[in-house]
Image (cartoon, helix red, strand yellow):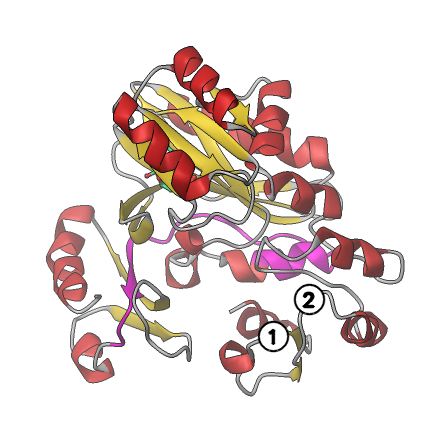
Amino acid sequence: MLALAGMPLGHTFVFLEPAPEATRDIGEVIVASADDPQALHRLASVSDVVTFEFENVPVAAARAIAGTVPVHPSTEALATAQDRFLEKTFFRALGIPTPRFVAVDSRHDLDRATAALGLPAVLKTRRLGYDGKGQQILRAPADVGPAWGALGGRPLVLEAFVPFSRELSILAVRGGGGAIAYYPLVENHHRDGILRRSLAPAPALTPALCSRAEGYARAVLEQLGYVGVLAIELFQVGDELLVNEMAPRVHNSGHWTIEGAVTSQFENHVRAITGMPLGSTAAVGVSAMVNLVGSIPDPATVLAIPGAHLHLYGKAARGGRKVGHVTLVGEDAAALAQTWRRVELLAG
Ligand code: AMP
């Protein structure tokens, strides 16, 4: 999707990708793992700028080429986002509220952490968790032993369980010259830890909520000297926002921007990393984005739904895997609700 947005701007793309199915015929594909030195050398030697759309790219690989070719976002942003404990510590240092959290490296630590935070709480691996993987909810003392059995042995973090009223995300983009633009806040609905639906702009936004989220995004972007699109996932509790995590990349909760914003997150990311002026992040209407998870619906059935924009990723379908999304753009949320429910019946 980054390449599809960048090609009209005159760019060509080279991909470093261990499983090339998602890059089809839109540029050279170097089929290798991201820490293959020869592949990295080839990528750096043919590129003017390198970016990533997967936050578990090895930091050492990004550092290895950052001396030869600009890498955006920075390796510091990548390293911070890869470790939930470092990430939350970083947010706190900037005065950004997060759920309470404690690092856990042993069973003894876990007992102390549950005593300190109380239950319910969420035990997470510090690294490599996504879509709810590497997580256990501790509701009662009897859950502690099994959760340790499932996750113990790896560096962990215990977080207080947040009784949020909803999950939101903010996407922001910072250009090479330091200009920042914010997309409207998005409301996200998950099932089994996987994002299923995003509504943008989120219903019932207040100016205070928006400026709070934008302030947090600005603080992160400026502290990191960040260039590109950043996503921050938030829990709303009353009028407050707690930051759950950040993604130093274009984000699934920003896919609606392809049709629903003046400039998509993908185009703005390309603009930012190539030193071009940013485009408007304004919404052109109200959007609903529905992920296609685990199975690919019949395209004709999806496209028969008025206003449906279908995006298939060219990935083989398997349980829990995001294989595409559908975006609907309308004038108001009530009208959209009719059609997104039709899409969701097809969405897995
Ligand atoms: P994560 O992998 O941290 O994004 O978590 C996946 C999902 O688990 C989130 O989108 C929330 O729905 C839920 N979750 C994560 N952390 C917490 C928490 N501290 N309190 C309540 N729910 C959480």
Q: Residue at x 33, y 18 (%)?
A: 239
Question: Where is mark 1, residue-wise?
Answer: 18
Question: Where is mark 2, residue-wise?
Answer: 34
Between 133 and 153, the one lying in front of the other is 153
The quadrant where ligand 1 appears is: top left
- Residue occupying the far right of the picture: 67
Q: Name which residue type carries label 2.
A: Ala
| Residue 256 visible, this orientation | yes
Determine whether label 1 and label 2 are within 8 Å by CB.
yes
Q: Residue at x 22, y 77 (%)?
A: 297
Q: Secondary structure at mark 2?
A: loop
**Where does the image place residue 264, in percent across and percent down from the top left?**
49, 59
Residue 135 on the magenta span: no
User: Is 209 displayed left or right of 13 in the figure?
Assistant: left
User: Is 250 displayed left or right of 164 in the figure?
Assistant: right
Magenta segment? 268-296
User: Is 297 displayed left or right of 89 in the figure?
Assistant: left
Between 289 and 152, the one lying in front of the other is 152
**Where does the image place residue 24, in percent across and percent down from the top left?**
53, 84
Which image quadrant is residue 25 in? bottom right
Q: Secondary structure at mark 1?
A: loop
For the C terminus, the image quarter is bottom left
**Up-down: is 338 above or below 83?**
below
**Up-down: is 198 above or below 5?**
above
Q: Residue at x 18, y 65 (%)?
A: 343
User: Is 138 displayed left or right of 67 in the figure?
Assistant: left
How packed mark 2 is, by other alpha carbons closer than 10 Å (few <14, some 14-19, many 20 or more), is some
